[in-house]
Amino acid sequence: MRIIISPAKKMKTDNDSLPYETVPRFTAEAETLLQALRSMDYAELKSLWRCNDSIAALNYQRVQEMDLRSNLTPALLAYEGIQYQYMAPSVFEDSQFAYINEHLCILSGFYGVLRPFDGVTPYRLEMQAKLSAAGCKDLYAFWGSKLAQLLSAETDVIINLASKEYSKAVSLHLPKSVRFLTCFFGEWKEGKIIEKGTMCKMARGEMVRWLAENSIADPDSLIDFDRLGYTYRKDLSSDNNFVFIKEGGNKDAASW
């Protein structure tokens, strides 16, 4: 079983908490993308990143100085987004680190697929960015089926806790023999179920922590997840889509 999650835009360098253990498996591809980024000027990169001047200046400097083989941070500790705050890996116990190291994969526009203790350097490159590299028009074309091939060689069950932007880089290329189980975290609003970005990120991080704390090995056991007020709804779910609804409000499923 593999659990896939999205990265976060905000990153940090942390060489003190834990050492990195491995080099990302697609480091050669990351080098190709880095060269593509270095071929662009500041204005082009700012447009690619769709950010303000402060963020653009920081990441432009990173691109110029980036070294993919030194001063690295374990991927699990490098990202600072909401999902990672709720996962809270900095307070994991040894057994939880062992579980995460075996099961968790972080998808990345720059690195492809990361293991928790792969050493990374801060970067900014979303999967949907229109970066042309190696004759490919964008990152979806650049990565092609590589990510799916790697994951399907390791498992026949993928728990999808990634956003659509990242998950489709895998799901569109998986063989039918691999079960792709997506978790949906919603709440009722005006008689309809909606997914809110911040709440989803919180729930995804909390679920990763819950999986690690309970050493979950059976994907169907995910129906027992009940944190942050979420409850599994069998009537709204299917074999490959588990729906969790935040408690409160209208519980009538007919309008979804």
Image (cartoon, helix red, strand yellow):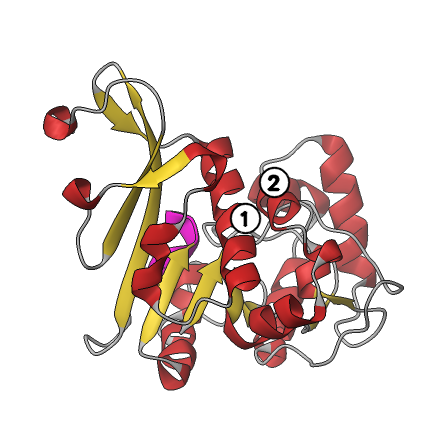
Outermost residue toward the bottom in this view: 153
- Reply above or below: 239 against 226: below
> How far from the left and from the top, in percent, is residue 186?
34, 33
| Element under disc 2 | helix
Judge by depth and name the residue closer to the eye, 87 or 143.
Answer: 87
> How far from the left and from the top, in percent, is residue 117?
68, 72
Left or right: where does residue 124 sit relative to residue 61? left
Quarter of the rendering occupied by the N terminus: bottom left
Mark 2: few/some/many CA within 10 Å (<14, 14-19, 20+): some
Magenta-drawn segment? 162-169
Mark 1: few/some/many CA within 10 Å (<14, 14-19, 20+): many
Query: In the rendered image, which quarter is residue 24 located in?
Result: bottom right
Left or right: where does residue 187 sit relative to residue 226? left
> How far from the left and from the top, in percent, is residue 198?
51, 32
Q: Residue at x 66, y 44 (%)?
A: 85
Residue 172 visible from this viewpoint: no
- Reply above or below: 185 against 163: above
According to the picture, the residue beneath numbered tag 1 turns out to be 205
According to the picture, the residue beneath numbered tag 2 turns out to be 82
